[in-house]
Amino acid sequence: MSEPLTPRESSTARRRGLTIIAVAVALVAVGWGGWHWANGRHVESTDNAYVAGNVVQITPQVGGTVVSIGADDTDYVKAGQLLVKLDPSDARVALEQAEAQLAQTVREVRTLYANNATLQAQVSLRKADLARAQADATRMQDDVNRRAPLMASGAVGKEEFQHATAQLAAAKSTVAASQSAVLAAQEQLAASQTQTEGTSIEQHPNVQRASARVREAYLAVQRVQLLAPLDGHVAKRGVQVGQRVQAGAPLMTLVPLNDLWVDANFKESQLKTLRIGQAAEVEADVYGTKVVYHGTVTGLGAGTGAAFALLPAQNATGNWIKVVQRVPVRIALDAKEVAEHPLRVGLSMEVKVDTADQSGKALADTQRTTPVAATTVFDEQFKAADTEVAQIIASNLGRGKPGVAVAARKLGSKTAASPQKHASAPQPAAGTTLAAPVVQ
């Protein structure tokens, strides 16, 4: 058993322990101070950050009754895939009426052009009649001129001279009537030509108006099928089979999870060192500290969250207490890292921004030259409508087989009148067995 320390040894040991502790604290303080000076003072962090992305509402452009649902919540869909189908019966009837009207209009305009040739022939005929009448009048005038001196000498009787004079008057009347007929025929031709000059049958205003109605009706038929405008996951499906929906009513939401970013709400006192282009490290609560995303500051909000709130604060009224405001800062994420560790809209994040690089700008000053988002899914619909119109015009001009477009659509073949199809047709959502999606 060791002997107890003397008071002097105990005091020495205590001082030694306190010295060691003081040295350790000093080393930690110096180390922390060095780290803060080298790195820590250049880092701004916040845990008030959330994942954001494009939330696309799927809304119909025409009203109708839902007969099929092609995707449900959590489903992944490709751009152009069928999501919802409405009853197309009314739209098809309207299309058939518009097609018939276009066909009739083309034939009526063809009649206008055909009438021009007929009226031109009438003008030529009237001019020929006028020339003949003028020749007859000239001959009659010569007869009168020859008989006038002979009547004075008695070689020609008075009755014969009067008969020749009457024939001359009748010939002159015929010439006047022929001239009026020529003018009338020319006026009729001019009136008819005003309906056709400077344009072709295909470009005639009447045909263009009827064509526009066919395009409108054709697009209405196409729009009963709601297609996905882009790749993404379905969320918030609220539509049901048999439901009557109006144009613009939200049916479901499409979220492209491959194009996400983080909105980090930094305090206003942290904004002085934040610049566009600075590097950021982001951690998601769903993965913890094991997964670190690397991003870039792409923009700072134009105002605080309170300024754009539904009910903005009225700080000029009542008892005022200063509250530190926050400004949203957008941080773009590495698409490859997001693909390896998928995120969801609204997840909580922790953001650290390295503010050592101050070469960037606090506000963006470059104008965007490319669209934020775009889709080409609906371009083919209008092209198909143009093809439909061209087929109807050609068939009624005698340049194509009549009824090709209409017959093809009724048979459900893959013509321009058919909706866009995809390699993998979507399966109907649960509870829609009575209305399986059928591509017409």
Image: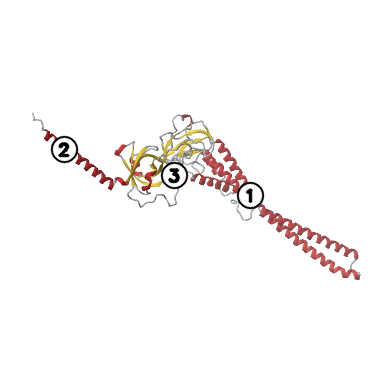
| Rendered residue at 63%/55% (across/down) | 197
Residue marked by disc 3: 303
- For residue 198, which quarter of the picture? bottom right
On screen, residue 16 versus residue 362, left or right, reads left
**N-term mark: 1 or 3:** 1
**N-term mark: 2 or 3:** 2
Residue marked by disc 1: 109
Q: Which of marks 2 and 1 is in front?
A: 2
Query: Which of the labelled discs sits on residue 336, or is there none?
Result: none
Find the distance from the CA under tag 1 to the CA under tag 3: 61 Å
- Give the farthest residue toward the right: 154
Which one is nearer the viewer's eye here, 230 or 153?
230
Residue 115: where, in percent of width, then height? 67, 52
Mark 1 secondary-structure assignment: helix
Mark 3 secondary-structure assignment: loop
Q: What residue type is labelled 1?
A: Val
Which one is nearer the viewer's eye here, 346 or 238?
346
Quarter holding the N terminus is: top left
Q: Dot 1: few (<14), some (14–19), or many (≥20) neighbours within 10 Å?
A: many
Q: Which amino acid does label 2 sit on?
A: Arg
Colouring convention used in this rendered image of the protein: secondary structure
Q: Is residue 246 above or below residue 202?
A: above
Query: Which of the labelled discs sits on residue 15, or is there none?
Result: 2
**N-term mark: 2 or 1:** 2
